[in-house]
Image (cartoon, rainbow, N blue to C red):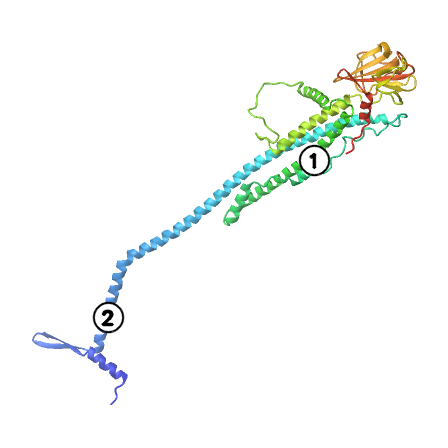
């Protein structure tokens, strides 16, 4: 007969857990308790559960400290990571604060430098304006020569017009175009990079950084504009200086000597009426406020020197006898060697003879003081005017003298009437120009007054 699986399992259980009986004797009587297989299995299961609980509890007690330590270590690691992040953030914020403070200081220095440079640029512009105004008066005075001249057509040329009254044009040399304005300070770039790298930086700091960056860019643009203006001023000053030097050179006097002479007088005028306690500076403060000359300082000093020379040459032209002593004239005898009209022999003629109508007005060719007014030997009736700075003019053979010695006269003011007194063959004006006690050819001064320097 076949045995099923349940029967086999039941037989196995009976073999392992056979029915057991527990006997006990009490009061002479024997009793027993039967323990079936299921009951034994239940007791075994309970015992195993108890042992498992004991084993778990023992392991938990043994490794609890290690587990707690591991948890503590994990917590400490997490705290350290967080603190490191906080420290990193604080460092980034401190870097941004520091960079921002440095940028503000740099911007303040930049702004102070720009203000000082702007004052220097304004000073140069004012000097040019004053020079233009001064030279306009000379231009108007010289331009009057072209109104009434009727003779000497071969010598007639354009009058000195618009030599130094040209409007500033926005011309920029190649050097100025290639000159790049100083870049925005690298500190700004630093805190920009820090701000970009740290997304958790405060918005206020980022706004401050952006504001400082914008201001630095604006100051950089202002500096670039200033450089262009100064470059244009230097070019314009150089052009005007070359024009004036060309005019003065035509008089055949030493241009450097004349410029130095009038520059010294301008300096004396500046120094008049000054005083106060002496407080020496430890170091020379330049245009930009720096202790060592920058390219701007060197350029500013160049323009100052050129402007001083330009002003001196303009003053020189204003005091030089470059005008004509007659409105209507003809040259009857040039300066230099000639045949003497009386002896018919070779002789030196130390002046320029102008023929004209008898008793026509003889005019002063520059401002000055009358040094002589009356007869003087072969000159006949003579007027001598001291124009200062070594320049003198003489007007000889006059019919009548209309000024007195010591009188201050203005350019184009009548000093006498054309005549034929003294050693003269007919009515004319003998005109002489002296510089540093040496006689000069008047035609050079007259041509300088008419000369136009073509740009």
Name the residue rendered at 72%, 25% in the picture: 311
Q: Vertical placement of 288 versus 426: above or below?
A: below
Q: Is residue 52 left or right of residue 204?
A: left
Q: Is residue 94 visible?
A: yes
Q: In the rendering, at what x and y percent does residue 370 appear?
A: 80, 14
Residue 46's disc number: 2
Residue on which the image places disc 1? 232
204 or 104: which is nearer to us?
Answer: 104
Residue 202's disc number: none
> Helix or strand or loop: what does disc 1 sit on?
helix
Q: Is residue 202 visible?
A: no
Q: Quadrant of residue 386?
A: top right
Q: Quadrant of residue 451?
A: top right
Q: Is residue 60 left or right of residue 263?
A: left
Q: Quadrant of the C terminus?
A: top right
Q: Is residue 4 left or right of residue 20?
A: right
Q: In the rendering, at what x and y percent does residue 271 appear?
A: 66, 20
Q: In the rendering, at what x and y percent does residue 165 appear?
A: 77, 31
81 or 202: which is nearer to us?
Answer: 81
As drawn, which residue projects farthest toward the left?
28
Q: In the rendering, at what x and y percent does residue 332 appear?
A: 89, 20
Task: Characterize the local packing of mark 2: few (<14), some (14-19) or many (20 or more) Cα atoms within 10 angstroms.
Answer: few
| Alpha carbons under labels 2 and 1: distance apart | 109 Å
């Amino acid at each position: 007969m076949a045995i099923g699986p349940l029967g086999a399992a039941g037989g196995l259980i009976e073999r392992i857990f056979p029915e057991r009986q527990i006997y006990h004797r009490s009061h002479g009587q024997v009793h027993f308790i039967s323990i079936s297989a299921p009951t034994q299995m239940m007791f075994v299961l309970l015992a195993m559960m108890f042992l498992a609980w004991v084993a778990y509890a023992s392991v938990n007690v043994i490794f609890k400290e290690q587990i707690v330590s591991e948890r503590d270590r994990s917590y400490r690691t997490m705290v350290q990571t967080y603190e490191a992040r906080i420290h990193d953030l604080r460092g980034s914020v401190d870097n941004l604060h520091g960079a921002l403070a440095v940028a503000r200081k740099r911007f303040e220095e930049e702004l102070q430098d720009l203000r000082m440079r702007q004052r220097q640029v304004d000073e140069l512009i004012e000097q040019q304006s004053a020079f233009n105004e001064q030279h306009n008066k000379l231009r108007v005075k010289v331009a009057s020569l072209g109104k009434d001249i009727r003779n000497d057509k071969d010598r007639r040329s354009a009058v000195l017009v618009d030599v130094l009254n040209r409007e500033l044009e926005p011309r920029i040399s190649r050097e100025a175009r290639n000159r790049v304005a100083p870049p925005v300070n690298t500190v700004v770039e630093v805190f920009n990079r820090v701000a970009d790298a740290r997304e958790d930086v405060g918005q206020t700091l980022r706004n401050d950084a952006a504001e400082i960056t914008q201001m630095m860019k604006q100051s950089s643009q202002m500096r670039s504009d200033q450089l262009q203006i100064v470059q244009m001023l230097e070019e314009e000053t150089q052009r005007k200086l070359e024009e004036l030097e060309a005019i003065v050179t035509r008089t055949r006097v030493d241009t450097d000597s004349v410029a130095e002479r009038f520059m010294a007088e301008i300096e004396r005028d500046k120094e008049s009426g000054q005083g106060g306690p002496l407080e020496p500076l430890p170091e020379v403060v330049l245009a930009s406020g720096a202790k060592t000359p920058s390219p701007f300082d060197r350029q500013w000093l160049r323009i100052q020197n050129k402007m001083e020379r330009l002003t001196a040459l303009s003053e020189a032209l204003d005091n030089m006898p470059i005008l004509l002593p007659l409105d209507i004239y003809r040259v009857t005898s040039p300066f230099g060697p000639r045949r003497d009209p009386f002896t018919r022999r070779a002789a030196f003629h130390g002046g320029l003879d102008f023929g004209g109508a008898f008793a026509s007005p003889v005019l002063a060719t520059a401002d000055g003081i009358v040094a002589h007014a009356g007869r003087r030997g072969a000159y006949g009736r003579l007027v001598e005017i001291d124009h200062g700075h070594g320049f003198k003019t003489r007007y000889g053979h006059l019919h009548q003298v209309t000024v007195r010695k010591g009188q201050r006269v203005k350019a184009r003011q009548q000093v006498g009437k054309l005549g034929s007194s003294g050693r003269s063959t007919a009515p004319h004006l003998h005109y002489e120009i002296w510089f540093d006690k040496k006689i000069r050819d008047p035609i050079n001064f007259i041509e300088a007054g008419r000369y136009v320097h073509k740009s």
